[in-house]
Amino acid sequence: MCRKFIVINMKTYELTYIISSQITSEEAESTKKDVDSLIQSNEGVILRSEKLGAQPLAYSIKKQGSGYFNIETIQIDESKIKGISENLLKNDKILRSMVVVKKPSKVMKDRRSKRIMPVSDFPSNKKSPLEIMKKEDKKGDKVDTADLDKKLDELLKE
């Protein structure tokens, strides 16, 4: 007996929708359950659901200044996602909805960067070892390495 299995390409989507604030929180919860059942009836899987509650809107939508925000991460066949978004548009309790394809994030490699210390970070009352060496080279005198080491130790102690 040979069985054939149909493999459906399911993509991961992020569904965000705003429920009207003119209804009670219980009605908003029932609307959320309706959306969840709509997804599951279309053979979708809810991976994560986040309820943000009543939030003020940045601008009014359908003459309303706030709404109940819901964000869900779902996996569903791409041919059925259009039907879900059309259903959300027809629902009077939902002010706005948006479906976005969620792609797996790539891990970025850390870039190495050389940090050069600017001259302004040196204390103003102390001179840097390079400035001391330049002044002594200008005099024409040869610098003994032992003397230079002593001067560097003195500068570092200060």
Image (cartoon, rainbow, N blue to C red):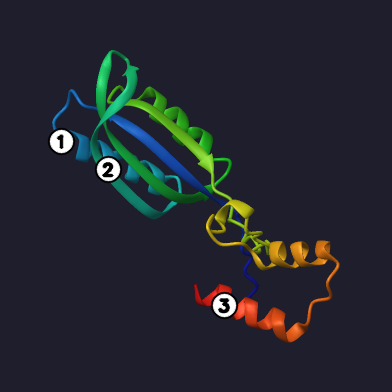
Q: CA distance from mark 1 to mark 2?
A: 12 Å
Asked if residue 4 is positioned above or below residue 68 in the image, the reply reads: below
Q: Quadrant of residue 61?
A: top left
Q: Amino acid at mark 3?
A: Glu
Q: Secondary structure at mark 2?
A: strand
Q: Residue at x 27, y 25 (%)?
A: 93
Q: Nearer the viewer, residue 137 or 55?
A: 137
Q: Nearer the viewer, residue 82 or 6?
A: 82
Residue topped by disc 2: 52
Q: Answer with mark 3 or mark 1, whichever residue precedes in sequence.
A: 1
Q: Secondary structure at mark 1?
A: helix
Residue topped by disc 3: 154
Q: Residue at x 57, y 77 (%)?
A: 154
Q: Nearer the viewer, mark 2 or mark 3?
A: 3
Q: Nearer the viewer, residue 44 or 48?
A: 48
**Percent coordinates x, y for residue 51 in the rendering:** 28, 45
Q: Answer with mark 2 or mark 3, whichever residue precedes in sequence.
A: 2
State yes or no: discs 2 and 3 in contact (Cβ < 8 Å): no
In the image: residue 137, left or right of residue 62 = right
Residue topped by disc 1: 25
Q: Residue at x 26, y 18 (%)?
A: 64
Q: Secondary structure at mark 3?
A: helix
